[in-house]
Amino acid sequence: MSRQILRNIHNTLTVPAQFKNLKKIRRFVKKFIRQAGFTEDESYKVQLAVDEACSNIIEHAYAGENQGDIVCSCECSNEELIIQLVDYGKSFDPERIEAPDLHSSLKDRKTGGLGFYFMHQLMDEVTFMIVPESIAVNGAGVIDRPVNMLVMVKRRS
């Protein structure tokens, strides 16, 4: 597929925020990445970052399964892939996430807290924002509550 054709391709998938749907999201992202011509290594990194992000949405934003939806959008240009994850659950402040202590022994480390760190390691850019209510999101029309949006960018090698 020509990279010129890829200039404006994009896709969106909306699924209930359930752990069983992580596989569906991974397949959706993998298919899109392959069509966009990224390498296997790049594809793996993006899928891992998306999987971690969606797991965090289910666990933290929705406090468990069946509490809302995850909207995953993929967009590709000649230079980069952009993955956007939207949810309507509880927001968080990424500035309050402590950097993980990677030097202490495993038994001394607290459980969790590595997800956001891994996303930053796997992707070229990671941005989290809370979009105010009553604005259009992804062509979905007007949303009457704040929306959580995570945008991850992977540039071509």
Image (cartoon, rainbow, N blue to C red):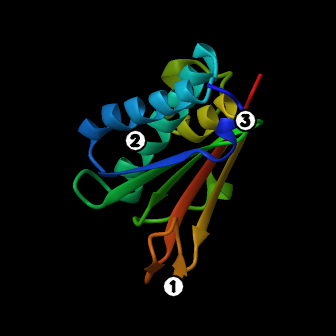
Q: Residue furthest top?
A: 40
Location of residue 62 by image quarter: bottom left
User: In the rendered structure, are the residues bearing label 1 and label 3 in contact, judged by CB atoms less than 8 Å apart?
Assistant: no
Crowding near pointer 1: few (<14 within 10 Å), some, many (20+)? few
Question: Residue 134, labelled with which disc?
Answer: 1
Residue depicted at 77% across the width and 22% down the height: 157
> Alpha-carbon distance for marks 2 and 3?
34 Å
Crowding near pointer 3: few (<14 within 10 Å), some, many (20+)? few
Q: Amino acid at mark 2?
A: Ser
Crowding near pointer 2: few (<14 within 10 Å), some, many (20+)? some
Question: Residue 4, labelled with which disc?
Answer: 3
- Tell which circle, 2 or 3, labels the residue nearer the N-terminal end: 3
Q: Is 93 situated left or right of 54 in this image?
A: right
**Please, is residue 22 above or below residue 30 in the view?**
below
In the rendered image, residue 104, in percent from the top left (x then y), is placed at 63, 22
60 and 132: which one is in front? Answer: 132
Question: Which residue lies under the disc numbered 2?
Answer: 55
